[in-house]
Image: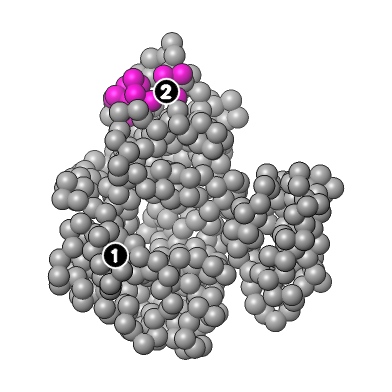
Amino acid sequence: MPLFDAIIERTPLWRPEWREALLRMREHPDAPRWNAEVGDRLTAEDLDFVRRYQAGLAEGRRRSEDGPPEAIIEWILMRRGHVPYFQMALAGIDPSRDFARIPTMSRGDLQRRLEDIVPTDVPLERLIVNPTSGTTGHPIPAPNHPRAVGCYDPLIQFCLARHGVRERYDHNVIAAVQLCFQKQTIVYNTVHSFLGGAGFAKVNLDQPQWRDGGSTGRFLTDMAPVFLSGDPIAFGELLRLKIGCKPKAILSCALALTPALRRELQAAFGCPVVDFYSLNETGPIAYSRPDDPTTLQALPNDIYIEIVDTEGNRLPDGQVGEICVTGGRNPYLPLLRYRTGDTGSMAHGHGKTDDPAPLLKLANTRQPVLFRLPSGRRINPIDIGRILRQYPVSRHQCLQRKDLSVELGLDCGDLEYLRDSIARDMAELFGGEVEVTIFYHRDWAGQQSGPYSTE
C-alpha cells in the first residue's frame, strides 16, 4: 500500500497538514524499524463523544463514600436486558439496594464466557481487539471500541495538568513516545485526531531494532515529545542508555514503580513522574497525586471502585483487599464488580480540597522482573510469555538461579512432544548464553505461576 494510504484509511478525520508530524517521525534518519500501521479510527461522532467525556471529567469529580453513585446504578440497569452475564448475575437483585450481593466478575469470566459479557444490542462493526500481555495469567482478547481508546487522551491530559503540565497540541507537536523493552513488539508512528494531529510513536529500546548505538538518543531528542510513557522495565533501560531528551513529564504504568526508580527518573530528566494505574480490561483507574506519589487518586468518573474481601464483601476504608471496578466507557466490555487481581485500600473522606475523588493505595502490585545474561543483556518476561502462547501451556513458572541458569516449569500435556521446539525458541531468546532446563510444572516445589529470579 502506498505511503500514508494505510494511515489515512485508519484515520477517518485525517487532514493534509497532519502529514508533517508523520514525516517527522517516519523519515528521521535515526528512526527505528517501523513494522506496523496504526490509526485512531475516530469518526466525527466519536470525537464529539471524547470531547464530551473530557468536559465531564473536569466537571464531575466526586466522592462515592456510601456505595455506587446513581449514575453507575443507571448504567447497570440500562445493560441488564442486553448482557446475558448481567441477567444471570442480577437475578433477584436490586442493584440500588443490594449492590454488595452482586457476585464479582473475574478474569476467568472474561476468558471463558466473553460471549455472555459482550452486549447483544451493540453493533460489532467497530470492534477492535487489544489482547492483554498475559504477564499475570492467560491473555484476554479484550474487545474495545475506538471511542473508548480515544478517551485515554483526555484522561492522560487530566493527569498531566494535575502535575502542572498543560500543553497545546497540533500537528507541529509530538505528543508522546511510548517506550518498550522487548525482543519483539509492534513499533509504529501515528497521529491523534483529538490532539489536532499531534504525533505519537511506540518504539522498542532493544538496541538491535535501531540503526546504531546512538540512534535511540538522537531520535528521542529530536522528537522532543511532551511526555514519555512506558513501564518501569523500559524506563530502567532508558536510564541505562543515558539518553538526554527532556520530556515535560514521564508516565509510568503496567508495573510497580519503585521509589528508587522514580527518584532516578526525576534526577535524570527533571520532570514530574506520574504513576498511572491502568488495565487493558478497564482502561485508566487512578493516577499518583502531585503531593504524594505513593498515593493514587481515582481518575475516571464513569467507574466505581471498591475494595472487597475473598467473598466479595466491600471492605471499609483503610483495609486491604482486592480492587474491584464497575462501569466504564467500553461498549463491548461492560464490567460488573470486576476483580482486577490487584490489591489495595481506599480512603474516601480524605479532606483533599483540590480533588474530592477517592484515594487508592496499592499493595502487592505487579513487580518488574528481568532475566540477566552473562553478556549484560536483559530479557523481559513478556518475551517468554509471547513464545509460550504459541503452545498449549496452561501455566508456567520461570526461575533464574544465581549462576544465571534458567529453569522453566510448564503445565503442558504435550510437553514431551513439544519440548525440543520450545527449547529451540528459548535458546534463540536467550541467545544460547545460559542453560535453559524445561520440565513439567508439577515437579516444581512452588505453586505460583510467573517469572522469578533468585538474584
In the picture, residue 300 is in which quadrant?
A: top left
Q: Please indicate, yes or no, whether residue 399 appears anywhere in the rendered image.
A: no
**Relative height, residue 353 to residue 402 (above, below):** above
Residue occupied by mark 2: 84
In the picture, residue 215 is in which quadrant?
A: bottom left
The residue shown at (15%, 72%) is 17
| Circle nearer the viewer, 1 or 2 | 1
- Does the magenta portion include 95? no
Q: How many marks?
A: 2
Mark number for residue 122? none
Pick the front one: 366 or 393: 393
The residue shown at (32%, 78%) is 26
Furthest residue to the front? Answer: 1
The residue shown at (51%, 28%) is 104
Pick the front one: 57 or 7: 7
Is 368 displayed left or right of 11 in the figure?
Answer: right
**Relative height, residue 72 to residue 352 (above, below):** above
Q: Magenta region: which residues?
A: 72-88
- Does the magenta portion include 80? yes
Q: Amino acid at mark 2?
A: Pro
What is the C-alpha distance between the residues marked 1 and 2?
Answer: 37 Å
Residue occupied by mark 1: 6
